[in-house]
Structures are given as structure tokens and as C-alpha cells.
Image (spheres, helix red, strand yellow):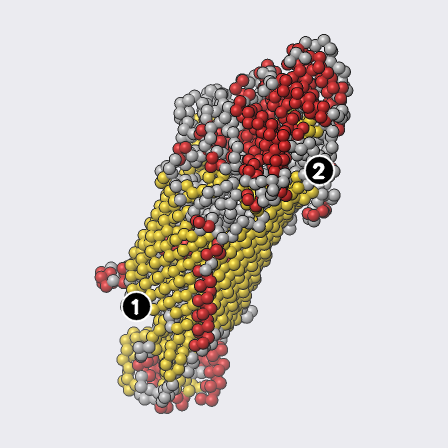
Amino acid sequence: MYLTAYCKAVRISRGQFTKITRTMRLVVIFILGACLQMSAKGLAQTVTITEKEVPLEHIFSLIKKQTGYTFWYSVELLKDSRKVSLSVKEAPLKDALEKCLDGQPLTYEIIGKIIVIQRRESTPVQALPVQVHGVVMDEDGGHPLMGASVRVKGTNSVTGTNDSGIFTLDNVDEEAILVISYIGYQTREIPLKKETALNIFLKRTIKNLDETVVIGYGTTTRRYNTGSVSRVTSKDIEKQPVANVMQALQGLVPGLEIVQSNGYASAQFRTVIRGSKDLFSAGSPNVPLFIVDGVPLATSNGDINSSGLNQNGFLGTNSGQSPLYSINPSDIESIEVLKDADATAIYGSRGANGVILITTKKGKTGRAGVDINAYTGVTLHPRKVDLLNTQQYLAMRHEAFNNDGITPTVSNAPDLVSWDTTRYTDWQKVLAASARTYDMQLSYSGGSDLTNFRLSGGFHKETPPVPDGFTTTHFGDQRLSGMLTLNHSSVDRKFSSALMVNYAVTNNNLAGGSYYQFNLPPDAPSILNAAGKLNWKDWGSGLPYQFQSLFQPYTSQTTNLLTNLSLNYNFFSGFTAALSLGYSTTNMNQLQLVPASSQAENPANATSYAQSGTNDFRNWIIEPRATYNATLGKGKLEALAGATLQENLTQGGTLEGIGFANDDLLENITSASQLYATSNYAKYRFQGYFARLNYNWAGKYILNLSGRRDGSSRFRAADQMGNFGAAGAAWIFSETSWMKRHMSFISFGKLRGSYGATGSASSSDYAYLARWQSMPVYDNTGTISLINPYNPGYQWQVNKKLETAMELGFLNNRILLSVAWYRERCGNQLVNYPLPSYTGFSSVVANLPALVQNKGWEMTLNTTNINTKDLTWSTFFNISINRNKLLSFPGLASSPYNDNYVIGKPVTIQKVLHYTGVDPATGSYQFEDANKDGVISYYSYGGASNDRVGIYDLSPSFFGGLQNTLQYKKWQMSILFDFKKQRGQYAVSNGIAGSMINQPVSVLARWQQPGDITNVAKFSTMQNTPYYNYTNSDARLVDASYIRLQNLSLSYTLPENWSGKARMKTARLYVQAQNLLIISPYKGVDPTNPSLSNYGFPPQRFFTGGVQITF
Amino acid sequence: MSARYNLSILLLVLVTFSNMTSCKKFTDVGAPKNALVTNQVFSTDASANAAIAGIYYQLSNGSLGQGYTTLYTGLSADEANKNNISTGEQQLLTDGLTVDNTYSATLWSAPYAVLAQANACLEGLAATDTSTIPNKKQYVAEAKFIRAFCNFYLVNLFGNIPLVTTANWTSTVNIARTTRDSVYNTILQDLGAALTDLPESYPSGQPIRATKYAATAMLARVSLYLQRWTDAANYATQVIDGMNIPLPAPENTFLIGSPEAIWQLEPVGGSVNPFETSQWYAFGFLSFFLTDQMAGAFETGDLRQAAWVGMTNSSGVNQYYPTKYKGSTYSQPAVEYYMVLRLAEQYLIRAEARARQNDVADALADLDIIRSRAGLSNLPAGLDKAACLLAVEQERRVELFAEWGHRWLDLKRTGRAIAVLQPLKPKITTDALLYPVPASEIQKNKNLLPQNAGY
């Protein structure tokens, strides 16, 4: 409305003009967006004018007619103007304006769709030389751009920015114009206008290729990177209503395999980059190194793929809490996954399994803004297994007893004899009656030239599926988190500092164990009796009550502090020293209560029990480093040297209290009549010295050398130090003139390769020491026992990585293709070597001279399919193919590993019996007697053969993801599929069909009488040897491939004039669904984790809806 | 900023760097705060004592101290059965074990785990002298006693076994099995050495650490198993005369402070009273139960039946379980210790040894001491040797049922196993009388081959 009003006022007097200008500036900003929207109507931006000696006003009216742009000027202004002749044909508006104003004392400025004509200011007579400082930053992320070129226009004076984006120029004319250029960003010209301290923001040109990519101790771009780095940014994370960011990465990173261990929000995610490298590992196998803003996780990397925070041996209901659960996904700006030697060698002894760098969101200079985001939703079980109904189940049981010749009794068949056989309970439905998820995020960010900040807070709560009769207030995993980032630089821009503080509190209230036993008999009694109490009585003693855990609360509470301060000082042009100080601490308190009332119908028969556990992790890291940037010949040289000192301290223990006078005292564990304590202590120290040299010759040839010397306390003094290093190189062949001439459709072409060695010290602390530890009292004496045997010593596991890749861009990089081939060979395997138990110990840490190879292909394809004003559609596809192979293993045949591994086969195989069907005569499962000794043998003794001839690899043969992102006007939609081709264990029931466990309907095809040809043995109540063999046969290893609709997100941004009325900058409504659909031939619980059988909660399905508002 | 400021920062950075290079020892973290290394342990008498007490702790806390010997050999013999029986337990019940049976493997690994602690202590002590460890001799004797005790069970359950006399796994990881006779020689040597240096009692007054009586009692038992009747009778007499007490009433036999106790284990690991009873019956649910044969083996009026056998009625069927231990496993007060060696067994050893030496009259006198405590009448005086031996077998059965596998070991050593068990376990063979060496052990050391016959 303002727009039309002012557009009419073409002629305004001078007095009015200044007043209006002031108002206008505000209005213009306000309506800018609206104007841009209007331009979508397709007004011409070019003009065709052929006029001779006409007044300027005439030209203006022609332009207005042709373009729809309105001119603003004071009448007096044009008095001094000359008449103009102009002849342009379909010339850009700016060209036409420049031509007609050429030589006039006038200049112009385009604001929105308004052309403001102003008086040209005369240039000052004398300018003074000054020193100018500035910082060059990315407009989107606000992070500094290192190596940007800063030139004084029209002179030879030029410099580059350091790794904090800071530059200094001496003897600059105070009215000079600076030209700032940086590859991948739009070049900007900045008139100094006597300012000597500048904040300069550059806009990106083409995304993807020139996006900043975080690497170890620095940044690069996809264009110039010599290594293999995959990047996922906040825009893909935010679409997914997940509690743990690892879940959002599924399907988005080639080479990264993520398996969710169960459906609890705080659960672990098994994370493996490019295949299994470890045989029986001495520590936690295949764990990548996780680093958050330069600080390793407080838990170190120990057990990240298994017990996580629960390193005191008390795993809890969720089977261990993920340390990454303490990091709010909404605070994450990007995640970089470093894979090859070039990218990981700078992490030396810790880089063998890849590195995952998590970078948090930072403040942006500019007006302070508030962002609010909240969603809520329901959680459902993604898949149901088709089980027998009561009638079918009872018939199966009767038939089994008949077959066995046994009479059902109260003790062996309460389901037939004492329970109400007319009952039917669909346990899958009852046990997962309701679940909810809630999420709320608030952030406030802003800043000035020298200082910017971002402050955020978040809350997330998820409840596991809760049975009928319970409410979601009983159980749930929740997290409250807050984060502050603060960046500041000195006025002269030589000194800068960045502070990040992240604090999170998590609180999990869960049942004391999994109650999700969906294969209980369908006629089993209810969970609660009529009085709402534990239904011991109806269950009886044949199959005692199964839901005690619902009344045995488990809580775990963690606090997590992660903080980093980095200080940078630019000593002289190109040379910067930096000091990064990091501290992280995580504290976990667990409590498991087992009241007497939950253990027996008559609590007097039981003893109340409670267990508490603490895990306290403290980690500090100091990393001084220096960088030097210089121009050398036609190229840019960047040198980096630094050091790391790190200490991780793990302390904790458990306290068990047994026998409480009253169940209400359980939470005060010290009121137990008996207390038992265990303690856990480990100090891990690490030192490293690293250097990297990167030379980029004319943007065509890049060489990157990195090396590291590391020492770790995990080895005895003589074996502590190790050297690691890598070389990487890239050739951007699209920059050659031949390519430009003959193959111009290739807009980008790069060949890169790397080779190097990294290490893994995946071993527990102190394993080289024969250690004695305190044990409880015996005979009034605190006792000590030998807990770790004598060890003659061991060394790093070494992973040699080779990679070559080609990256191509077509059609002005609308199509980006990357294909990488890699080969990793991991030797000197650090393993828990199994000892015969007669030695008194089960294993000892040792190096094995075995060599494991992972070789594979990774391909990514980004395409921008449609890119118009109203509609954009882009696609991201990736696929990873990894082949694992045990290359050598001296002495395998005589080693304890003989039944686990085969040379030439993957290390992830299972050797099983070969199932040959059900004997039509007897109805028993049959197997191939491969060694023809007349018996089916599963075990063999050193040298002797067994019948395990079925060799199956349980690692995926390929996996990947497909993401489509569509934007139509104010609608946005994203669909992410992930897929995996794999074989997995099928185990819906942990008992033979006929025992007191419900079975899938497929068992109805069982053998009934001699002559029956079928695949299901006769029903039986006995866990007999053929059944036992069946569970160890290839009949159980089935196709568990899947295509999963992992995420569907749909959002709508409210029109500005609506949100504007409510003083909102933007407002967005969205619905999101996670784990929406699984297409799989797999009949078990969840093909994404086939090891989940009948007790674990499978990953859940989420439907959420939310709103995001920015002020 | 000034040049001087620049310089000072540069200096700071340089100092930090140079500090690092001098940090060679930075990654030398030493031993953890919650642990000791071997030479620290054996540097004082108190910590050496703690290590010796640690052996008992491991014995009491492990599978042996929690009654698994009783349960699993009870299934193999005619003592025990189980509700909701698993495949592996079913194998024990029918004496049809496979080499991967995890239950019999428990009875292999549990004594070896204790034995390793004993060996570690012996090695640690070997490097010391009595000036630093005044009680060194006693500690060595205790470690040897427990080593002998563990080897006794291993050799009886598994036959030829790897004889482990060091905690250094590098020298034992590939060893072959040692014959039963050689193992027994080592047992006798260890017990002999223990007998010399063990004290008669301890300051605590409770026989929860090895005494001279314990070593003598074990020697009596070992002699019996080796059919050295004279030795067996002599050692048993030494114990009986040395202790010189009347047998307490059955209900008092297993209590803390029971005069009958020669060696008991203090319950640890969360249990206040011995764990064993809860293995049979807990929370109102019966898991293991006594076979009808065992429950019916008592003569009418046997006080032991009333004191030591409990009954529960599950849906109309009476099932029985041992109640030698009555204290609540986890709740105070502590009333019982876990009995390992007691006086009644010594009377039974002497009775048998005497009968074997044709001294039936004295044998019957010993048996009658046991019977009179049980409120039973004396045996008829005119029994012949064979009948007397059967009377010993019966008395051992009802006296020592559900205690440390006596029944299974007795049937084996007397050659009566097949005759007694066949009616219950039609498929039993003599090969089944030895458990197999666990398959997982042979996988780790193929020198353990050959496997016991029949597996």
C-alpha cells in the first residue's frame, strides 16, 4: 500500500525529499521482500531506447514504461543536467542508466524497484594513507574466510586473510576502494570512506562446490579439497525430528553405516565408516573419532559403539546411553565425515576409523534475531509381526504336547491348563499403546562489527511406547540444553577469540527392563489385575509374571558441559598463531530400583534391591598451532604446525544396596542393610605434534602433505610413540585451456588421490599392567584380586588408506558427480586375544599379525533438476559399496579364531550349518553332514572338521540414500529414502514352535505326519538339538535388505504480510515424519537392525507437526 | 598493537610449545588410582593378606561359592531336577552332554579362576621374604590349600586336566593335559605343604580361612578317593580327635559358629547368607527341586529330613528342595556360612576306610554317631562288609545331599554310578561320568586333545 502511494509521487519538492528519504529507508527495507516477489511477474529488466538530445526526464519515463521501475528525484536536481542521446538495444537496466548519466553530475541507486537519482559527490582533493584492518566472512554462516584476496582498487597493493579471516593493509588511501574476492563467493568492492576497521561479508556464488568444508584444524572447499570429506548441514538435520543427530545422518553420508541399537531416544548408534577394520577388538571396534568444535567427547571414544556413557558396567534399560544424545541437533551447523588418509592423517593415531567433526552454530553479525521452533508428535511402532491368534496358538501347543507324548500340567503348560483360554491379547498393540514426542527450541543471536553471539536453549522429550494403563508421564527420555557462542575481535583485527559453551542435562525415566515381549502367549493374563496392581496371581508359577520391570523404575541423569575457547593472533601478514583450549565433562547418575513389591506377590518373599551407578568423565585439551599463508609463484602456500595435549579422566562406580526395611527407602541407597561398591578409574593421556603443508598452484594443482607424531598412555612407555602421515593431491583439469575449449560442458572436473597411514589405539587403559583391584571384604579384610593378567606389551593398529576419486560438474555445476574408490588395509590388529579359561583370564590385549582389507566405491550425485523462481527441485543420491576381506592371518587354523574367520572372506561372516529342510519321515530339521562323519557337529577341535559350511557375510553389500528437495513458492518438501542390501539374523521368537512362546503365522505350515514336505519342523515343547542347530544354521540368515522412507518433511512459510503483522520476520508451519515406511522382504522385527529380536524396542516411527517463528 | 605486545605473545606461544616437547613423560600415567601392580601388593604384610583373602573372596563369589557344583552334579546324579529346564541342563539331567555345554564348562572355568588367584599370590610371595611379609609361610600355605581344593574338583569332574601352577599365561597357553595321577600328586604335595604351615585357628574365631584341620580333612578325603584307606582313616581320626566335639543337632549344623564346621565360606557379593537355597527356591517359585528318589531316601523319623528338606505344593504336586541354609539370601541377619568341609564327612570317611579294611564294627560305630545325631537307631551289628559299605553309601547320600557334589563323586569313585543311575537315565554310559573338556577351551589350545572318551 505504501508502495503505490509513493510511486505516484514522482515529482516532489526538495524539502519534502529529504524527509521522505528518511522514512523511505525504513519502508524500503520493510517492503523489499514484497517488491522482489512482484518482480516474479516477469517485468523486463532490459531496455531498448533510441533517442537523440532529449531531456533526461524523457529517458526516465521510457525506462519506467519498459521496466516498471519508478524514479525518485528532486526537481532541482535535474536543472543542471544535460540533454542526452542514447541508443541501446535490450541493454541491462544498469547499463542504460550508466550511459545516460555518464558525464552528468548525477548518480543513481536502485532500491527494490525504485531508482533513486542523487547528486554525484565530488571526490576529495587530498586523501591520507592509513592502515586498514578487516575481517572477511561468509554471509550465510558468519564464519571467517581464510585466504580471501583483498586488493586496493587500481593499485598493486594486495593481501590475503589469515585463518581467522583477518587482513591488514598498510598505506591505504582513506578513500580507496577495496576489492575482496574469494573463490566461490561474489567479488565485492568496498569504498573505505575513511573507515579503517571493516566487517566484510561475501555472498556465495554457487553452492556445493565452493561451500566451506570443515577439515582437521582448518577449512577448505569441495572444489579444492584433496581428501574425502562428506558434509551434512543444519538444513538437512532440521528436517528430521530426531533426538540424536546420528539418526539424521542415516542415508546422507556415503560410507557411513549407522545402526540404531534400539528405539529409546537416548540409545546408542553403532557408527562405522567404510567397513569393519577390526577383528575381535581390544576396545570398542571401528569407532570413528568424534570431535565437537575441536574438543573430543568427554567419554573419549571408549565404547561409543557399545555402552556409551555407561562405562561402569551398569548398562541400564537403554543398553547404554549415547554421548551424542547430550548434543542438541538444533545447535549443530554442520557435520563433516572425514574418511581417507588425506583427511584423517592429521588426527594420526586416532584417525584409522575415520573422523566425525561436529561444528556448532555461531552468531551472525547484524540485527539481533530470535528464532523459536517447536514441534510435537506421536510415536508408533513401525512394523508388526504377524503372530498366531489364541486359537491357533492353543492348537499349536496341544499338538506339540501330543508330539512329545507329554501331558500338559499347571507347571509346564499354564497357558493350556490354568489360564483363561478365551483371552486374546495382541501384545504388540497393548505394549505400545501410546508414545509422544515434544521439542522446543529458542535461539537469540546477533552482534556488532567486533562481537557476535548466539544463545540458544532447547528441550526434547520422547516417551517409549507405553502399555495400556500407564501414561506417558511414567516414562520418557528428556533433554534440556543451552548453548552460547561468542566471537570477538580487537579493533585492529589482529586478535580474535571465540568461545563456545554447551551445557545439556538429560533425564531418562524408563522401566527397569524391556517389557516389550510381544511374543508372550496370546491368552496370557493381563498386566494389571482389577485392582490395578501387578497381576501375579493370574499368571501363576508355570510362567511367572513378566512385567515386573514396569514397576522397577530406572532413571539416568546426565549433565554435560562442552566448552572451547580459541584465541588467534595475527603477528604479521600471513602468519597467525592460535591456541585452542577445550574442556568437556559429562556426569551420569543412574539408579535402578527393584522394590520387593515388584518381585513377588507376597513382598515378604523378596528382598528389595537398588543399584546406583556414576560415570564421571573429564577431558581437557590444549592445542597451540600456527599457520602461515603465502603466495609462492603462481600458487598459494598454506602451512600449519601444531601440537595436542589431552587428558581424559574417567571415574565412577556402582553401589548396590540390598535389603531395605521399606520399599520407599530404595532411593536412598545407603539405607540398605548391605552395600557393595565397585569403582572405575582410568586416566588417558595423549600428546601429538602435527604439521600440514598445502600448496595450491593457480587453482589447478593442489598438493597436501600431513604428518603427525603421537603418544598415548594406552601403551607401555616403550611403545608409546607412533608416526603417521599422508599425501594427497588434486588436479582440477577443468581449469586447463584444452578442457575449456573442447569440453566446456564440463564445468568442473577434478581428479584427486591420497595415500597414508593412520592408527587406532582401540584398547582399554592400563591393559599392559598386571593389575590388582580392591574387592569386597572377606574375613574382615578388604580384599584385592588380580584382575588383569601380565602382558608383554602391544602397539598401535595401523590402517593404510589409499583413495582416488573423480569429481565432475556439468551444466554450470547443476549436476555434480563424485565417484571415489578406496582401499584400506588394517594390520597389526589390536585384539583381545582369547585365552583358555584355565589360565584364569578370558583374554589378553595383543597385536595379531592379521590384515583386514576394506575396498569399495562411493558415489554421490547432486542435481538441480528445476531451478526457477517459483519451483526448485534438487536431488541428492549416494551409494556405497564396501567389500571386506581378511587378507592374511598367520596361524589362523590353529588359533581360537578358526571358527570365526576364513582367509579371503569378510571378517563379518558367520559360519553356520547348512540347513537342508525338514525330514519328511520324522519332521525334524535336517542339516548337511559336510564332513560325512554321521553326526551334525557345530563345534570342532583344533584341526578337526565340523559341519559349518554355510559362510554368510552379515555386513551390507551396498547402502545409500536418495533425497529429493522441492520448493514451490512458499511450500517446501523433502523426501529422504535410505536403503541397504544385507543379510541378517531372523529371530522373531527365541523358542521352538510349540513351546510357551507365540510364533509367526508361518509356523502353521509345520510337519504333521510322515510324508509331509515342509520347511517347519513338527511342533514340540522341547528345545531339542535339531532346533538348536536350526538356530545356528543358514535357515536363520535371511535377506534383510530394505528401502526405508526415513524422512518426509513438508513446510509452508506464511506470507510476509501475515507474519509481518504479528511482527515476525518469518513464520513457518511444518509436518515431519521419521521412519515412515519400510519396504523389505524381512519378516522379523526391523531390518534396519536385524539383531533386535523379541525384547528390544525397534526404532520408532514419528509423526510430528510444528511451527518455526523468527523475530 | 605495539611490537612489544606482539613479542610477548609470540614468547608465550613458544614457551607453550617448548613445554610440550619436554613432556616426554606426559603420557606416562602409571597405575590407576583404584589398582595396584604386583610388586606393590606384596610389599607389605597387610596387602599380601588382602590378596590371600581375595582368593577366598573369589571362591565365595564365583560359581563354586554360589552352589553350582551342587546343582549341576546334582542333575547328573540322582539328586536334582529342575522346572523350566533348559537344553543344557537337560543334557546334564540325562547325562548326555555335548562338548559345548555351558553348564559343565562353568564347573571348569570357576575353579581355574580361583586357582589363578592362588598362583598369582604364590608368585608374588615367592619374590618376598619374611622380613617384609612376616606371615609369608601361612599365606603360601593358604594359597596351596585352595589350589589343591580347586584341582580336586577339576580332576574329579574332568579327568586329565591342564595342570596350571603359574599365573603367567604365556607359559601355560599351549600346555597339554596332565594325568589324573600326576594331578593328585600335586594335590597331595600342596596339601602336605599347607598342613605344615597352616595355623589351627584365626583371630576371627571362624573357620572361614584354611586351618590345619581343613588341610587334614582334605587329605582324608583325597586319601579316600585314592583308596588309601589307612591314610584316610588316620587323617580323619586326626580331625575327629583334634576337634573333639559332639555333632550338633541337624538344624544347627550350617550356622555361623557351628562346632561341626571345619571350613566355611563367608557369603559375599551381595548375599548375607549362602546363595545356594535361593538357587532352588526363591520369591515363592521353585526352580531346582530334589528328585523323588532323593526326597524319598530318608528313613522315617530322620531328623535331617525335617531340618534339611523343604516342601512346596505347586498345583497339587509336592516338590521338595534342600533347606540346609535357611537364612534369607540378601537380608540380615547373617545366620549361616557356606559349609565346605565338616566333621560328619570325616566320620563317614573313616567309616568307609575302616569298612574297606574289613573293620566293620568300627565303621558301624562311626556311622551310628552320624545316625544318632539324626535321631535314628543304630545299625544292626551283624552287617557284613558289603552291607556296611552300602550303609555308608546311604548315610553319605542323606547326610551330604546337595553339598558340593558328594553324591555324583561318590557314585563315580565307588563304581556304582551306572548301576544306580541307569534306571533313571537309560542312556548313561561310563564315558558320561567325566564331563567333556569345554569345546571353547580346545579351540584356544588344541594340545588339550584328545577329548575325554565318548565326546
Q: Secondary structure at mark 1?
A: strand
Host chain of mark 1: A
Residue A273 position in % (x across, y down): 42, 49
Q: Nearer the viewer, mark 1 or mark 2?
A: 2
Residue A244 circle label: none
Residue B368 position in % (x across, y down): 74, 17
Image quadrant of residue B334?
top right
Determine whether A674 is above or below A452 in the image.
above
Q: Tell me the residue at 33%/80% (across/down).
A: A97
Determine whether B327 is above or below A30 in the image.
above
Determine whether B378 is above or below A989 in the image.
above
In the displayed structure image, the side of residue A473 where residue A14 appears, left or right: left
Amino acid carrying mark 1 in the image: Leu
Amino acid carrying mark 2 in the image: Pro
Badge 2 is on which residue?
Answer: B203
Host chain of mark 2: B
Residue A411 position in % (x across, y down): 65, 27
Which is more toward the observer, A560 or A785? Answer: A785
Residue A632 circle label: 1
